Image (cartoon, rainbow, N blue to C red):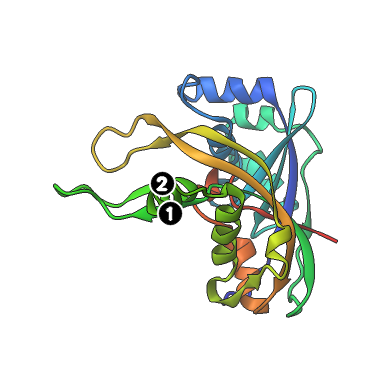
Amino acid sequence: MSNESLFMLRAEFDELALMRFADRSGLNLRVADGGYILHAATRALFGDAAPRPFAARDDRARRLTLYGYASVDHHELAERARALADPLALDALVPDSLCSKAMPAAWRAGALYRFTARVCPIVRISGRAGGEGPRETDAFLHQCLRAGPDVFVDRQAVYRDWLARELARDGAARLPRIGEVRLTRFQRQRLARRDRSGPDTRLRRCERPDATLEGVLEVGSPAAFAALLRRGLGRHRAFGFGMLLLSH
């Protein structure tokens, strides 16, 4: 496991300036979603050091607040932005809003933390006949297909189990009271992604589940848990999904 430092970043963005950056950068605003625009803006600001995963909150009028995990602190990120960033992206970043804190260098096995996570709970299924490759599908819809039309499937329970599997990778963490994990928000979200399988890499829309889960987790392997925070949960982690936010 890596011993690389990890910082939690906080930054605010002006929504109008962010849309101006996206428009003048050539993004199709009829297709691009908020997560994709923030991904593009943070890459323009910080390059390879851009926070990933991250979570965004619409906390104030015409302001977006971003929280994310990064391998460098806000001082280095600010230097990168001043030296190399697209001026339109820099204009979208609210002055003096960038700050960070160092995450613990070591976690204690058995420690309990409350968590909130916005995730995209999908599973990969084998392709159809005729050579179609593996596809992504909503874990809930996949379970419904497996159970059959006459069987009730609890979306919250399916997403709890999906989350438990994600946390358990390499023994990172577990859900000691899985029945108390709550699905606090859900919608089908239309996301923008680039299809890089062929020569046409224009943004295209895809529909994916967008779920927020809250509960209590228990740290398993400290090193694996640190890696989990850095990596994030599930798919689409560079676009506003998968950040594990911890609290007392």
> Front-most of 167 and 226?
167
Identify the secondary structure beneath mark 1: strand
Residue at the limit of the structure toward the front, as seen here: 150
- Residue 164 vs 79, above or below: the answer is below
The x and y percentages for residue 27 are 47, 25
Quadrant in which residue 179 is drawn:
bottom right
Q: Which residue is mark 1?
A: 123
Q: Are marks 1 and 2 in contact (CB under 8 Å)?
A: yes
The x and y percentages for residue 11 are 74, 41
Q: Identify the amino acid type marked 2.
A: Thr
Identify the secondary structure beneath mark 2: strand
> Front-most of 222 and 180?
180
The x and y percentages for residue 6 are 68, 63
For image coordinates 61% across by 62% down, the residue present is 230
Q: Is residue 35 visible?
A: yes
Q: Identify the amino acid type marked 1.
A: Val
Residue 137 numbered mark, or none? 2
Crowding at dot 2, Cα within 10 Å, few <14 / some 14-19 / many 20+, comes out as: some
For image coordinates 53% across by 47% down, the residue present is 120
For image coordinates 79% across by 23% down, the residue present is 61
- Residue 181 vs 203, above or below: the answer is below
